[in-house]
Image (tube, rainbow, N blue to C red):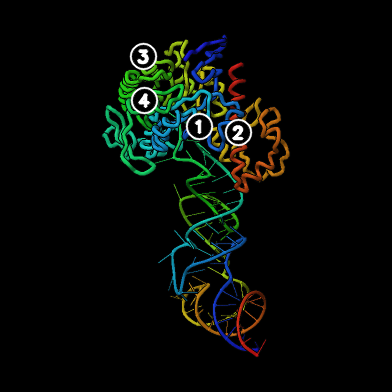
Amino acid sequence: MEFKIIKKSKRSRARLGLLKTQNGVVETPCFVPVATQAVVKTLTSEEAEQAKCQILIANTFHLHLKPGENIVKKSGGLHKFMNWQRPLMTDSGGFQVFSLGFGKDLGTGKILNAHNANIKLIDADESIRSGNQPKEVKITKDGVYFNSPVDGRKLFLGPKESIKIQEDLGADIIFSFDECPPPSADYKYVKGSLLKTHEWAKICLKVKKSRQTLFGIVQGGRYKDLRMESAKFIASLDFDGFGIGGEFGSDKKQMVAMLHQTVKELPDEKPRHLLGIGYLKDMESVIKQGIDSFDCTIPTHYARRGMAFINLKNPVKIDLSKKSFLNNKNPLDKNCGCFVCQEYKINYITHLFRAKEITALKLLTFHNLYFLILLSKKSGKK
RNA sequence: GGGUGGUUGGCGGAGUAGCUAACGCAUCAGACUGUAAAUCUGACGGCCUUUGGCCUUCGGGGGUGCAAAUCCCUCACCACCCA
């Protein structure tokens, strides 16, 4: 892997770069569509390519459960398996293990919002402090025990296991195994959890045998000093790049502040990936903080719910399933070059959604991805 | 003409004396940030001062009962059977 910075903004930390992998070059800043189960839901790999996806991120946790990394390996690796000859990332599975444990009980998320704050902050903290971990998950110094959401089997995933699986999957860029505490976790818990994440980071580096690019993950939740501490530590290790994970506080300002603290401690010359952030309004602020790539389920996820991204100049989301759009004969966005905007009108897509036709999901997934990728490019050049 | 069964909110459909007319669909609203996610939550007879309160409603009308979607009478309509 080679990362080349082409241009740096004078007004912010934003930068244009080229991330060279064995399977091609990624122009940054770049949005990374999520292909959890080795597919961008509703799209073929050809369609993902047509939507201008440069790189996709698949998931270790899901692919370990289904179909199992051995199947993928025997098929010649993830690229061949899913017919995607461009760059690929795999997430370590850390987030998933926790989002199904603490997350299920307490709402693992990126932002401490009204929804997951409702899940009894005090109880959460107390149960974590007193060691009452959720039934579904048991965290030890070596990793995490959890029950398979597929068949209930007891499974274990730790740094060694995650790296081994990711090596079998064979993505270009892989991530270290981290603990992702819930937004309701308190300072003491997050601090303690950093010790594990950092220890695991060292193990990931140590056990990796492949030539894959390995990104270390910075945690620290919404606590400034913990973010700094984590960033410093992870930056001191021999990673090829960095992921920034976890939760970022209760509002956008706090998120930007956390990113600021974190990025400050990371070496300029290495790529930085922000895990799981990608609301429309996040795009610009995140890029300005010096983030080179970021993945998010939102564009594809929203697409399947009928939420469309429109208006490149002042991006907003609209709910296409609303009846009123049946009278709208315009394309989603006149300035979007995607085939959906070229060939289809809003009222037709709205009709498909209201009629529960699966083509609606594909059309909107394609558009949202194309739109967001275009938007992230525009934001990067600003 | 006779008989049998039926008629429940926008639709389907439970309920056969008393508890909030269950449930499903449709509709409407909201949520969603490293996807157990083509999902979830809420509303869905009306009105109000909405953590509550008042009224209305099970084809129409009448009756019995403290109390009726539920029992009785009658009318209308639908389905099937007999003539």
Image quadrant in which you'd find residue A140: top left
Q: Nearer the viewer, mark 2 or mark 4?
A: 4
State the SS at label 2.
Answer: helix
Q: CA distance from mark 1 to mark 2?
A: 18 Å
Helix, strand or loop at label 4? It is helix
Residue at which label 4 appears: A163
x and y percentages locating residue A250 in the rendered image:
45, 29
Q: Amino acid at mark 2?
A: Phe
| Disc 4: host chain | A
Q: Who comes first in sequence, dot 4 or dot 1?
A: 1
**Number of residues whose C-alpha sits closer than 10 Å to that of mark 3, classed few (under 14), some (14–19) or many (20 or more):** few
Where is the C terminus of chain A found, in terms of image quarters?
Answer: top right
Tag 1 residue: A82
Which disc number belongs to residue A237?
3
Kindly give the residue lying farthest to the right in the view shown. Answer: A329
Mark nearer the viewer, 1 or 2: 1
Between disc 3 and disc 1, the foreground one is 1
Work out whether mark 4 precedes mark 3 in sequence or the reverse, and give the earlier one: 4
For the question of whether residue A111 can be seen, the reply is: no
**Mark 3, chain letter?**
A
Residue A366 is tagged as 2
